[in-house]
Amino acid sequence: MYCQNCGKAVAENAAVCLSCGALPRSGNQFCPGCATPTQPIQVVCVKCGAALNPGALSGSSGERIAPCNPPRDPVLMAALSGCCIAGLGQIVLGQVAKGVVIMLGSMVIGVLTMGVGILVTWPAGAVDAYLVAKKLKEGRSVGQWEFF
């Protein structure tokens, strides 16, 4: 695999390009499959056919959240989610649609189970917010709907 920002070879699971310091999949100047220079509007590489921006092919569900301003303390995200409102941690981390679904789902489950379901949904949301915040703090990108 090649860094899409500088075109240098990087490991397939690299979080950061060691040549330029950018996220390997964050640029749009080079193909990740063959390092051929590309144009920002290209969706696939004309030389090897590799997808340059998978989100453009799959719609908004393929969007990734880059750790441009990761949370300083993942425990705070878990506390926000678990103690205040279920789904709030996800919203703060940039997973807005996922956070709203968790929030509404927790309310519905809470009503249907007379509050007992909240004992499961809030801790699960808190753990998810903590683990997503931890990934962002490590410099890894996460998907809009990525769990744990």
Image (cartoon, rainbow, N blue to C red):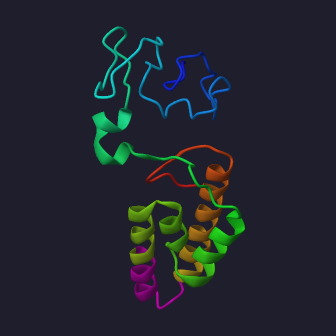
Residue 93 located left or right of residue 29: right
Q: Residue at x 49, y 72 (%)?
A: 87
Q: Residue at x 54, y 86 (%)?
A: 116
Please tell me whether the stretch drawn in magenta is mainly helix, strand or loop: helix
Instruction: Kindly indicate the quadrant of the structure image that contains residue 77.
Output: bottom right
**Quadrant in which the C terminus is drawn:** bottom right
Nearer to me, 14 or 40:
40
Nearer to me, 89 or 38:
38
Q: Residue at x 44, y 53 (%)?
A: 144
Residue 65 spot, x, y in % from top left: 48, 49
Position of residue 108 relative to residue 114, above or below, is: above
Residue 11 spot, x, y in % from top left: 64, 22
Residue 21 spot, x, y in % from top left: 64, 32
Position of residue 72 relative to residue 67, above or below, is: below
Residue 2 located left or right of residue 42: right
- Can residue 113 be found in the magenta stretch? yes
Residue 26 located left or right of residue 70: left
Residue 23 spot, x, y in % from top left: 57, 35
- Residue at the top extreme, as displayed: 47
Query: Across the whole image, how many numbered discs are drawn on residues?
Result: 0
- Can residue 130 be found in the magenta stretch? no
Residue extent of the magenta highlight = 105-116
Nearer to me, 80 or 107:
80
Q: Residue at x 64, y 29 (%)?
A: 14
**Quadrant in which the N terminus is drawn:** top right
